[in-house]
Image (cartoon, helix red, strand yellow):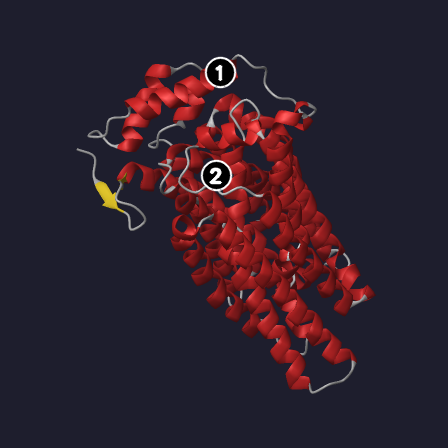
Amino acid sequence: MEPLLETRKSSHTVPLVVVTSTAVAVAGSFVFGISVGYSSPAQTGIMLDLGLSLAEYPLFGSILTIGAMLGAIVSGTITEKVGRRFAMSIADVFCIVGWLSIVFSKNYWYLDVGRFLVGCGIGLFSYMVPVYISEITPKDVRGSFATVNQLMICCGASLAYLLGTFLSWRALAILGVAPCLFQLLGLLFIPESPRWLSKLGRYQQFEVALQKLRGDAVDIFEEAEEIKEFTKNLVHQKEASLIDLFQKEYIHAVTVGVGLMVLQQFGGVNAICFYASEIFVSAGFSSGNSGMIAMVIVQVPMTALGVLLMEKAGRRPLLLVSAAGTCLGCFLVGLSFLSQDFQWAKDLNIILALAGILVYTGSFSLGMGGIPWVIMSEIFPINMKGSAGSLVTLVSWLGSWIVSYTFNFLMLWSSVGTFFLFASICGFTVLFVARLVPETKGRTLEEIQASMSSL
């Protein structure tokens, strides 16, 4: 009989193969986190060793998101054409080549090409990982398992921040290769997504994969029939194109998916992730390292708390609390720069900056970091998953690039105005979630998708 792991979230049990498959998939999320966290601690070493100017380094930081946009554009198509497992292996190859180019770079061309290739890889991962996890897990634990994606992104970024305080930038780049090799090996042993197999009409392989994922002792007949019936109905419809996404039956799902990604990015997360050290120094810290370590201490436990609360509290309540917290965090950072402008007590700006960034980081990690990706993986039916998933992932990375590239210019314009602007966007996010985002806790993917298209 399949070994089973008890969960605290329900009376159901989760087969070890689901846990193992999720662990293999989120190795891609770990690479994602390392990539995002790499640029801040590596900045000084790269600029000194390769002679990059202060104007040239933001290109290195932001070219990751340009590559990720390219990866995002093709992510849905690749994933639907070749399957979830093979698509993840393609992403691994991009990341491995990219990281090795950074490790052995002698000038900024190799450095930027490597960073671009890593971006392509994580652009693919950002869509594939949550979709694969949502399609293999039972409905009662789907949210918690899908949120492990964000937990591993946080762990990867946190590890890059911590190790970057004492490792060279080349040694830190080698760290990015290891999880890719782990995933490439693990992909040989985990099952393909049953829903993708059902879409292709490979019903024997579909049933074998689903049985393996649910355990030998579990009767899968009812779930298998629901999935087959739903996918058969969708197969008769043509694959949704980008234009088709804006038809009445799809518009609610697209609005929710795209809207959450826009608000997630324009709330300022990548500005804080990429330039945390610089923000702390600007606010009056003698060094950014202590503030970055404090961020790590807050970030990982809060993300883990979000995983634990996902199936108890639900998606919407966590999103509302998270968005309100990010609004407060940006407001406090804005106040710290206002305090600096008016030459209030120096200790006050430092306290406000530290409190604001920690409140922002903790709140974002609780919900806004991972839940938009969970909801994206749940609301789109299989016939529109490729085009809609590519659109949503592209929007996310486009927003990331815009924010990360323009952040320094915004800070030159007005540091106070920059963070008050981010606070306003986070405040609007609360209204958006309350008005438009559905609760998907405890429902099958087929139930969620049917209800979204019927609105």
Q: Which residue is mark 1?
A: 233
Q: Is residue 235 above or below residue 343?
A: above
Q: Which of the pair 435/157 is nearer the observer? A: 435
* Image quarter hosting the N terminus: top left
Can you name the residue that lies furthest to the top here?
236
Q: In the image, residue 316 lies at what x, y percent?
A: 51, 49
CA gap, disc 1 to disc 2? 25 Å
Q: Which of the pair 226/420 is nearer the observer? A: 226
Disc number lying in front (1 or 2)? 1
Can you name the residue that lies furthest to the right here?
413
70 horizontally vs 138: left or right? right
Q: Residue flagged by tag 2: what amino acid is it? A: Val
Q: Which residue is mark 2?
A: 129
Q: Residues within 10 Å of mark 1 (few under 14, many from 20)?
A: few
Can you name the residue that lies furthest to the bottom here?
345
Give the residue at x 64% y 52%. Answer: 431
Give the residue at x 42% y 37%. Answer: 133
Q: Is residue 194 above or below residue 433?
A: above
Q: Residues within 10 Å of mark 2 (few under 14, many from 20)?
A: many
Q: Is residue 113 visible?
A: no
22 horizontally vs 234: left or right? left
Q: Is residue 372 visible?
A: yes
